[in-house]
């Protein structure tokens, strides 16, 4: 018999069906055994009547989390037992036959509640079971729906989804890179991308004009609260645009996303308000202010654009200049001459724009330097030698000089956006297999040691700390 998903059982009243799934709850009432079953689409209550002898024998042995195939008849519930506020609350499954597909050990964690009372380290160790709880199932499924919505919206706007490499060269993104040793070129290393920044600009040089991807990004940072060593960006870049164009299309997609998939939520102000960095700092003391009129309403979304950022700031360690956001950004037009002549550095504004939601930055981007001399000037301000600029960024300078159009883009912190949409306390609740606060994976035991043979092949010797 063909499988029926639990969500479709209300369409099969009076019919015999076959469902596959997990035993959620078992209640033995002597002659009657009640069982709640679940699959990825929902839950249903089943009952084994006394005359179903074979099913009764199997039902007596069942325990939560056993995987079963159940055949039965879909019946309407007696009027006094109807639960209209529940999925399948108007029907129940009269169980005729049960086949055990796999037994399960006693779960080490309770997966019936929301799980927030359970030690997170234990939840992450048994994440494959933790993910069975309805809250996390909802989070991950909704994450998929949001991704699909954005993909479809960008496709309609003429964007092409293009994957960029994970094995690349180190880039100055402001954080420490994860490095990967090369077996074939001993002593040489790849770097895992902190973002696809250079590749997406190179795609503009390649003539694609509108690019996006859901990019995996890696940063070897110390523990910093709501961060992960690897995370997801919704990354986009567009040619022949100004700042207002990039802001407009992102605002349009975010509004449509919320109104379509989260109609219970209210966007505080449309169009999104725009505030300068200077105004934000003077009025709120932070560059990502929470402008909600009611901070007790979790379904209130207060989006805000923050623009007109300083391009450079003093590095507290080197005392030299460093970028505030991105070295590939362009200055605002009135400061281009200052950049090229490396003067008035402290007053140069960049074309950076951040999108802030309820006091958290969920995205940032800029119009880029498409003139190779302007990009070179940025690195000179930062104290890079001609030799270092050519070694690290010669490919970018050559590409920009090959006929690259004006371009700009943005990257959303996709995990962070999902925490606001799902009203979760941190990004680990919206990622299928996150790391813990120390960057470890308790389930897989990563990071871990490798065999001496592997180290020898790579020409690597581990020096123990003294």
Image (cartoon, grey):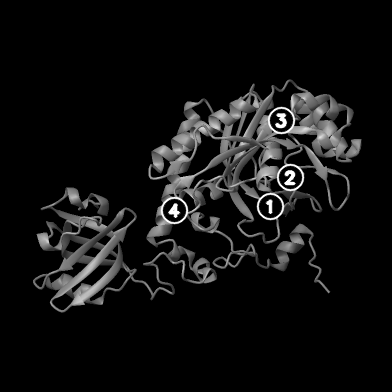
Q: Which residue is mark 3?
A: 368
Measure the C-alpha gap from mark 3 to mark 1: 22 Å
Q: Nearer the viewer, residue 199 or 407?
A: 407
Instruction: Check contact, mark 4 vs mark 2: CB within 8 A.
Output: no
Instruction: Check contact, mark 2 vs mark 1: CB within 8 A.
Output: yes
Q: Which residue is mark 1?
A: 219
In this rendering, position of residue 406 left or right of residue 58: right
In this rendering, position of residue 206 left or right of residue 2: right
Measure the C-alpha gap from mark 3 to mark 4: 35 Å
First in residue order: circle 3 vs circle 4: 4
Tag of residue 173: 2
Dot 1, how many residues are within 10 Å of its Cα: few (below 14), some (14-19), or many (20+)? Answer: many
SS for dot 4: helix
Q: Which residue is mark 4?
A: 139
**Residue 197 appearing in the image:** yes
Query: Residue 5 in the image: x percent, y percent?
Result: 27, 52
Dot 2, how many residues are within 10 Å of its Cα: few (below 14), some (14-19), or many (20+)? Answer: some
Measure the C-alpha gap from mark 2 to mark 1: 9 Å
Residue drawn 44% across and 40% down? 258
Quarter in which the C terminus is drawn: bottom right
Q: Nearer the viewer, mark 3 or mark 1?
A: 3
Is residue 279 placed above or below 29 in the rendered structure? Answer: above
**Residue 78 appearing in the image:** no
């Amino acid at each position: 018999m063909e499988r029926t998903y639990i969500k479709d059982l209300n369409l099969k009243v009076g019919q015999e069906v076959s469902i596959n799934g997990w035993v959620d709850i078992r209640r033995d009432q002597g002659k009657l055994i009640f069982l709640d079953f679940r699959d990825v689409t929902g839950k249903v209550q089943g009952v084994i009547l006394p005359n179903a002898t074979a099913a009764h024998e199997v039902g007596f042995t069942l325990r939560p989390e056993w995987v079963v195939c159940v055949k039965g008849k879909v019946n309407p519930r007696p009027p006094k037992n109807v639960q209209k506020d529940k999925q399948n609350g108007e029907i129940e499954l009269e169980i005729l036959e049960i086949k055990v597909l796999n037994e399960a050990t006693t779960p080490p964690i309770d997966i019936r509640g929301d799980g927030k009372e359970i030690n997170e380290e234990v939840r992450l160790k048994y994440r494959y079971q933790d993910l069975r709880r309805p809250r996390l199932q909802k989070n991950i499924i909704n994450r998929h729906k949001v991704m699909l919505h954005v993909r479809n919206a960008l496709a309609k706007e003429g964007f092409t989804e293009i994957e960029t490499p994970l094995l690349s060269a180190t880039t100055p993104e402001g954080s420490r890179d994860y490095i990967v040793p090369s077996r074939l070129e001993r002593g040489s290393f790849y770097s895992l991308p902190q973002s696809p920044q250079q590749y997406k600009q190179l795609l503009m040089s390649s003539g694609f004009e509108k690019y996006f991807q859901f990019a995996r990004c890696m940063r070897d940072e110390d523990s910093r609260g709501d961060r992960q060593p690897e995370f997801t960006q919704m990354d986009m870049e567009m040619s022949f645009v100004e700042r207002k164009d990039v802001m407009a299309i992102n605002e349009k997609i975010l509004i449509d996303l919320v109104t379509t998939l989260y109609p219970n939520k209210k966007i505080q102000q449309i169009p999104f308000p725009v505030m300068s960095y200077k105004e934000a700092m003077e009025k709120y003391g932070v560059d990502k202010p929470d402008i909600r009129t009611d901070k007790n309403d979790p379904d209130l979304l207060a989006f805000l654009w923050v623009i007109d950022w300083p391009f450079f700031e003093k590095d507290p360690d080197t005392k030299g200049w460093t970028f505030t956001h991105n070295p590939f950004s362009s200055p605002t037009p009135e400061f281009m001459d200052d950049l090229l002549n490396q003067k008035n550095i402290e007053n140069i504004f960049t074309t950076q724009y951040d999108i802030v939601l309820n006091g958290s930055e969920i995205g940032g981007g800029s119009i880029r330097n498409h003139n190779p001399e302007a990009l070179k000037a940025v690195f000179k301000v930062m104290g890079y030698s001609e030799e270092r600029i050519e070694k690290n960024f010669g490919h970018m300078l050559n590409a920009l000089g090959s006929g690259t159009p004006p371009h700009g883009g943005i990257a959303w912190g996709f995990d962070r956006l999902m925490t606001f949409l799902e009203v979760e306390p941190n990004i680990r609740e919206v990622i299928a297999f996150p790391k813990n606060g120390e960057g470890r994976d308790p389930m897989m035991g990563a990071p871990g040691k490798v065999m001496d043979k592997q180290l020898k092949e790579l020409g690597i010797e581990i020096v123990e700390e003294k």
